[in-house]
Amino acid sequence: MGKHIVSIISFALAFFAIQYGMDYYREYSAVNKANAEIEAIREEVRQNNPDEPEVLAVQEAAIKKAEENINSKGTQKEKVQTAAGTFLGFYLVNFKQRAEYCQGQGVDISPFINAFKESHKNEYAIAVKAISAAPSDVDKLYKMLKPQLETVIEQDMAYIASENGVSLPEACKLISDNAPTLVPDMHISVMQPAVYRALVSGT
């Protein structure tokens, strides 16, 4: 199993999409900017890390970029809001898009989804409060970004399947069956400590 059971390339696009997508009145511009950012990262890692699987190289680059963006903010409030947006991208990809993808594969991953939601309930409450978002705002943002998130989840799940020598439905089942041990390793405090520290610093 190991680290290859779930890669978080989806974290990368989610981060950029959330950062540019909070302005709901410029949806086309937000999505285009998100796509441009992630493609720039992909091109960079292709050149600098040709021997490393792209999904892992992109994940590493995106996590580094997320931390740099938080550190670049001038005020504590801005740092918290940036961390909140980053967290919400991470949350939506795994809580909503991964579930929908696996449902399309005929696999219910509720054990993973429920454990992931419970594990992050405090961080989610902090994040939506930090950006003054209502549930309808988060839903709208998710729908706006869904086509892009679908693409990266497809890549993410294909990588998981390949690394574990299983089919796509079996990859979904692997995630669900291993939820009790997988979810703690996927907590935002583990995946991105800098985002977690900035997010909870506002409480």
Image (cartoon, helix red, strand yellow):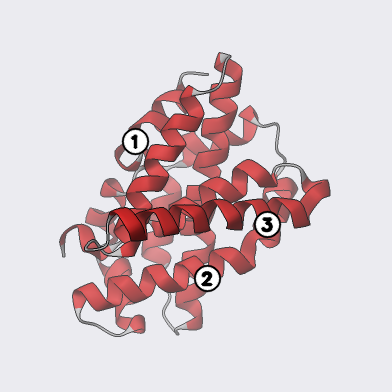
Label 3 Cα neighbours within 10 Å, binned few <14 / some 14-19 / many ≥20: few
- Where is residue 36 shown, x and y percent of the image? 59, 55
Q: Name the residue under label 3.
A: 32
Pointers 3 and 2 in contact (CB under 8 A)? no
Q: Distance between the residues labelled 1 and 2?
A: 26 Å
* Residue located 54% across and 70% down the image: 150
Quarter of the image with the N terminus in it: bottom left
Q: In this view, does 75 lie above or below 193?
A: above
Q: Mark 1 points at which residue?
A: 189
Label 2 Cα neighbours within 10 Å, binned few <14 / some 14-19 / many ≥20: few
Q: What residue type is labelled 3?
A: Asn
Q: In this view, does 12 lie above or below 71?
A: below
Nearest to viewer (mark 3 / mark 2): 3
* Residue located 56% across and 31% down the image: 82
From the viewer's perspective, is 192 left or right of 11?
A: left
Which of 84 and 155 lies nearest the eye of the viewer? 155
Q: What residue type is labelled 2?
A: Thr
Label 1 Cα neighbours within 10 Å, binned few <14 / some 14-19 / many ≥20: some
SS label for mark 3: helix
* Residue located 70% across and 42% down the image: 22
Taking the view exactly as shown, the residue that stands out farthest to the front is 47
Q: What residue type is labelled 1?
A: Ser
Nearest to viewer (mark 3 / mark 1): 3
Q: Mark 2 points at which residue?
A: 151
Q: How far apart are marks 3 and 1 (CA)?
A: 29 Å
Q: Is residue 104 visible?
A: yes
